[in-house]
Image: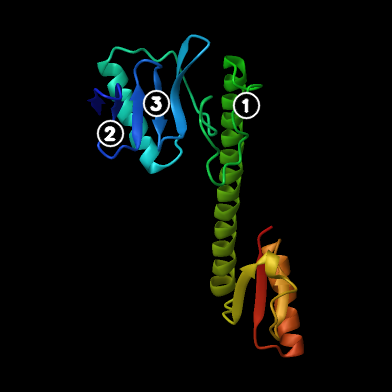
Amino acid sequence: MKFMKRKQIYQASNYNVTFDPKTTSAFSYHWWKFVGIVEGKVIFNNYRYSNSTSKHQSKVRTLLNELNIKIDIEMPLPAGLPGSYRRGLGMNYAPVTPENATLAGLIQASEEYLCDQIGNEVIKQQKRNERAKQRRFEKKLEHYLENVVHFRDYEIKPKSQFGKYNKVAVHQVVEDIEHDVENALHSFHRDGFGNVVFYVGV
């Protein structure tokens, strides 16, 4: 970043990130404040707003190190630090107001965001585990159908499609492979259907 003598600020060549050494404040795209002083502490907002703002943060972090300005607290603040001019499009977090612009308020906002992130990651992991479990069950069902009962006139669909898939066939939800396959094949042979649709999952 280059120091602009007339403006007395540092800015990148594309003008999209600035740092004012007098106020110890940095802005991305002239509105999203990610470095500032709150109650005497230098706060660095390390929330990753976008790829470009992440680059801006990296440039300012390097500049702070060169200027020997110590960061006291790093925290993720999606709405920006006090002094951000407007909310980002699609932002789900409340803008900074006088009520939450205190250091305690910012720390609370950061902790709430981190808790949300942890909760979202737990949900994602649960969904990944469910999908993996379903794939293992499907493989087990396929093996049983093709190698144990030697039956190949079948389809496997997600359980959520049961009652919605419009096809003339035996429709069977599978929870116990041996019992439910036996039940489906009984109907298949008894009623002369040409296909069995098995439904698995939650």
Name the quarter where the N terminus is drawn. top left
Indicate the position of residue 112 as horizontal and vertical percent values: 62, 28
**Residue 173 at x, y percent in the picture:** 72, 68
Dot 3: what SS?
A: strand
Which comes before the other along the chain, label 1 or label 3? 3
Q: Amino acid at mark 1?
A: Thr
Res 70 visible = yes
Q: Which residue is mark 1?
A: 97
Q: Residues within 10 Å of mark 3 (few under 14, many from 20)?
A: many
- Mark sitting earlier along the chain (2/3): 2
Does dot 1 land on a helix, a strand or a loop?
loop
Q: Which mark is residue 12?
A: 2
Percent x, y of residue 106: 58, 21
Q: Which residue is mark 3?
A: 26
Contact between labelled residues 3 and 1, with CB atoms less than 8 Å apart: no
Which one is in front, 131 or 49? 49
Residue 46 in view (yes/no): no
- Secondary structure beneath label 2: loop
Q: Position of residue 148 (x, y in %)?
A: 58, 71
Q: Is residue 115 above or below residue 52?
A: above
How far, Cα to Cα, is label 2 from label 3? 11 Å
